[in-house]
């Protein structure tokens, strides 16, 4: 699989080189395709999967491995098992989801449990949530990354709730599970892990807010004050405006979720 394709013009303002990464589920390596003709740039920029030949050297700058390409041809999609080319969590995804369902069942608050079940009782949502990545680069950027990240955040929030008794445990666990659900629509991950148009234009916080708002509106008796707390905690969980958070955390659970 080819990732992060970039074309750079040399100082002579004529010669174009192709910089990219070659990746499969075992990892990735930087690669260079020297002296690409202008009529090939558009074609090469659209290739997702390819058969690549070349040789490996170490970069003088830092000693990391780098591939120099001698031949690159697009691979026919029908010849591929895409799971062989996408990085995947090393955790057992069924076990991760079992842990999430166990936490959902542990929530005692009627409204919060119904909100959680409105998502996770939906097989289509659950399948997407199980496979979705948590990010493109920063953390858990692989199949199953969202479930893995969610379990990690839930565990931290559970510990915080056990230490600080004034914390509303049900609310904190609910938000730990739901805070990144928009990532099932922010990323495409069937053939390659990449942003969807919706993900590029809106981002997962806005998508998550829309998803939760739709569920709450379908419930006749969801308390208004609880709805505001849920939405505030979701909107503020990045913690800082410069990190993409539309609001700063202003309630105890929102602060705890941000630091988790």
Image (cartoon, rainbow, N blue to C red):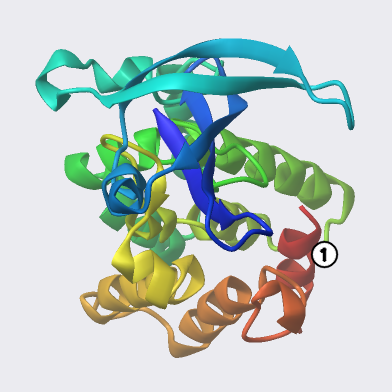
Q: Position of residue 98 (x, y in %)?
A: 44, 25
Tell which of 81 and 71 is nearer to you: 71
Q: Residues within 10 Å of mark 1 (few under 14, many from 20)?
A: few
Left/right placement of residue 62 relative to residue 85 reads right
Left/right placement of residue 78 relative to residue 202 reads left
Residue on which the image places disc 1: 166
Which residue is rendered at x = 59% and y = 63% of the image? 13
Q: Quadrant of residue 116?
A: bottom left
Tell which of 2 and 88 is nearer to you: 2
Q: Position of residue 114 (x, y in %)?
A: 34, 59
Q: Position of residue 42 (x, y in %)?
A: 30, 54
In this orientation, does residue 114 appear? yes
Left/right placement of residue 216 relative to residue 160 reads left
Left/right placement of residue 240 relative to residue 123 reads right
At numbered mark 1, what does the secondary structure look like: helix, strand or loop? loop
Q: Position of residue 121 (x, y in %)?
A: 24, 44
Q: Residue furthest left?
A: 78
In this orientation, does residue 249 appear? no
């Amino acid at each position: 699989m080819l990732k992060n394709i970039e074309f750079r013009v040399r100082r002579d303002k004529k010669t174009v080189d192709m910089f990219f990464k070659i990746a499969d589920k075992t990892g990735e390596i930087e690669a260079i395709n020297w002296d690409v003709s202008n009529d090939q740039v558009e074609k090469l920029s659209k290739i997702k999967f390819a058969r690549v030949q070349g040789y490996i050297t170490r970069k003088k700058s830092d000693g990391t491995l780098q591939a120099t390409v001698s031949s690159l041809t697009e691979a026919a999609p029908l010849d591929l098992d895409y799971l062989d080319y996408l990085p995947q969590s090393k955790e057992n995804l069924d076990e991760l989801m079992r842990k999430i369902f166990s936490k959902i069942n542990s929530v005692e608050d009627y409204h919060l449990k119904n909100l959680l079940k409105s998502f996770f009782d939906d097989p289509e949502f659950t399948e997407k949530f199980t496979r979705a990545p948590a990010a493109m680069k920063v953390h858990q950027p692989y199949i199953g990354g969202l479930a893995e990240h969610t379990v990690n955040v839930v565990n931290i929030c559970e510990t915080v709730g056990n230490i600080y008794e004034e914390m509303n445990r049900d609310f904190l666990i609910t938000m730990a599970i739901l805070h990144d659900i928009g990532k099932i629509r922010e990323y495409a991950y069937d053939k390659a892990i990449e942003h969807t148009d919706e993900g590029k234009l809106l981002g997962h916080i806005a998508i998550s807010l829309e998803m939760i708002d739709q569920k709450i509106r379908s419930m006749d008796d969801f308390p208004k004050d609880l709805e505001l707390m849920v939405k505030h905690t979701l909107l503020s969980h990045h913690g800082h405006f410069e990190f993409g958070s539309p609001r700063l955390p202003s309630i105890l659970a929102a602060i705890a979720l941000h630091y988790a």
